[in-house]
Image (cartoon, helix red, strand yellow):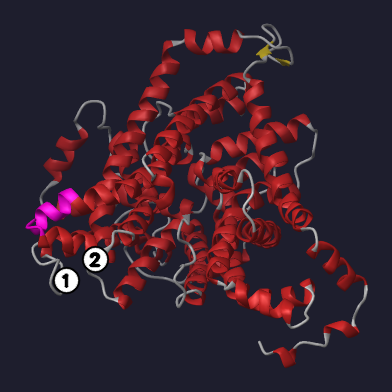
Amino acid sequence: MPSDRHGPRAGWGLKAATAGGVLFLHLPLLIIVLYAFSIEERSFAFPIPGFTTQWFGVAWEREDVRRALWLSVKVGAISMLVALVLGTLAAAAVWRSRFFGREAISLLLILPIALPGIITGISLRSAIGLLDIPFSTWTLVIGHATFCIVVVYNNVLARFRRTSRALIEASMDLGADGFQTLRHVILPSIATALLAGGMLAFALSFDEVIVTTFTAGQQATLPIWMLSELIRPRQRPVTNVVAVFVICVTFIPIIAAFWLTRDAQDTAGALK
Amino acid sequence: MTAAALPAPRQRGGALSGLSSFLHGRPGLLLALLLAPPLVWLGIIYLGSLFTLLAHSFFGLDEFSGVMVREVTLDTWKEFFGNASNGDVVLRSALMAAAVTAADALIAFPLAYFMVRFAGIRTRGLLYLAVMLPLWSSYLVRVYAWKLILAKEGIVSWFAQQLHLGWLLEAVLEIPVVGGPSLSTSYIGTFIVFSYIWLPFMILPIVAALERVPGSVIEASGDLGADAGQTFRKVILPLAFPGVVAGSIFTFSLTLGDYIIPSIIGKSTPFLGETVFRLQGTAGNIPMAAAFTVVPVVVMGVYLMVAKRLGAFDAL
């Protein structure tokens, strides 16, 4: 770039490429929102012939949509709790001491999201089959919590790294025991990181479809419901409305997580 | 937190405090207690299942009943390598993954570069959010959006007609192999959607790598007489390269294993993920599905080793 050393200003080409990238990422989502208000029922015709809000009511009345929504919320919440506990423990261990295999822990934690979901899914499926475990909410939770741990771990570890050890030593020197230090010093300082990590984990779980198909059996979470509608459409406008709903439910916790950690050097949702 | 806010600790002296001082004297035990739950979960549930699956590739199917026999055999692997179409599936998936990775790197780099080097704090935060939102959310919804966009009567066709570029769209679709009856039933469509979905996974590691390029190094390059272009090529690009490699771990691996995108948008010829899905589902051939799964695991194992050499893990 011609002027990037003195008072950095980006060239037009770079600005255009950036704008293009952002549009590429977000236009498709706007289009979904647009289609949710379409009066056209059968096709994806563009431009849409007219606007209506009736599909929101229709979608809300659908029993199958509500059931799927409830299952998704339940699985997301439980997975989030499991991930919060396990991710925080792992982060605490990695932060407070050096030990053999410390590097391997990070790799092990990131593996469930770095390896294709189908591998995690089919592995869990074959293990579930081998042990004759019936499919239930819990088989879903097992799958979801596994790939959610890393999100909490990353957020909490980043916060730990900026928490001064001196603070904890001071607490101990002033006579607090380990549990008091945990409650009055450590937890308050990592609270927002926990909240941010937890919300990202919820969003990730709420949206997951690949691992879910393998661990769900006959149950339908909201993404599973959507997938079946994509393959065999029954009422397209309802699918559009549910899609908009999924966008909202997953965007809100992510924006909140971002906002919670905005002053920090580490930002929630970065891959590390 | 002020000291006064703490309850006087010595007055408690209960079991908790006893446990606390017991643990305080034994850091190894505390470490073990912290590590055990996550390690048990990931080690047993995750790695355990992974190895169970890989082990299944050494089982075979009974020739007559088609039921899996739990005896160690190499039959599945012989069949896997004996069938040329299996190689096609792997090759097709790897080519797609490579193409998607290259496209994502090209789109992601300018965006990341702008974010780190030129954007003000506010713009930067917004851009960060703009990249993160699609990263963590609405995977299926975003695939669905492309179905609306690429469908025969959809948005791309409409714009092509409005701009009198219908002929161009036709010409693109008539390209052998990658073309098809419509964008949503061609490899071009699959490629666009893959690139779109995994793009954020490429942007963030590049941002992380660029953030670590010290300003002093760039100034030094200028002081030593390099112009902006030279500085970019010889200093910034090599230092940011581990970020591209880190991003490619995700784009490559995720493309290799995804079965939903090609089954919704693209041709009927299967990719790796679809093949595995079909084998374990309708075909009920778990051993062969397991054999197919070994491919991405091995590919990604090698990939991760090379990436570690190139320093990509620091940018992850």
At label 2, counting other C-alpha atoms closer than 10 Å, the crowd grade (few under 14, some 14-19, many 20 or more) is: some
Q: Percent x, y for residue B215? A: 24, 65
Q: Residue at the spot x=21%, y=35% of the render?
A: B173
Q: What chain letter is assigned to the residue under label 2? A: B
Q: Which mark is residue A8?
A: 1
Q: Secondary structure at mark 2?
A: helix
At label 1, counting other C-alpha atoms closer than 10 Å, the crowd grade (few under 14, some 14-19, many 20 or more) is: few
Instruction: Give the CA distance from mark 2 to mark 1.
Output: 7 Å
Q: What chain letter is assigned to the residue under label 1? A: A
Q: Percent x, y for residue B172? A: 18, 37
Q: Residue at the spot x=54%, y=27% of the render?
A: B293
Comparing A100 with B147, the one in front is A100
Where are the magenta residues, as a range? B224-234
Q: Residue at the spot x=22%, y=56% of the render?
A: B110
**Which amino acid, by three-letter code, is at mark 2?**
Arg
Tell whether B202 sits left or right of B280: left
In magenta segment, residue A234: no
In magenta segment, residue B225: yes
**Residue B305 position (above or below residue B58):** below
Q: Which mark is residue B299?
A: none
**Which amino acid, by three-letter code, is at mark 1?**
Pro
Label 2 in the same subunit as label 1: no
Which of the 4 image quadrants contains residue A63? bottom right
Comparing B83 with B108, the one in front is B108
Q: Percent x, y for residue B292? A: 52, 23
The residue that mark 2 highlights is B117
Q: Main secondary structure of the magenta part?
A: helix
Tell whether B17 sits left or right of B69: right
Residue B316 visible somewhere in the drawing: no
Residue B98 visible somewhere in the drawing: yes
User: Marks 1 and 2: in contact by CB < 8 Å?
Assistant: yes
Which of the 4 image quadrants contains residue A81? bottom right
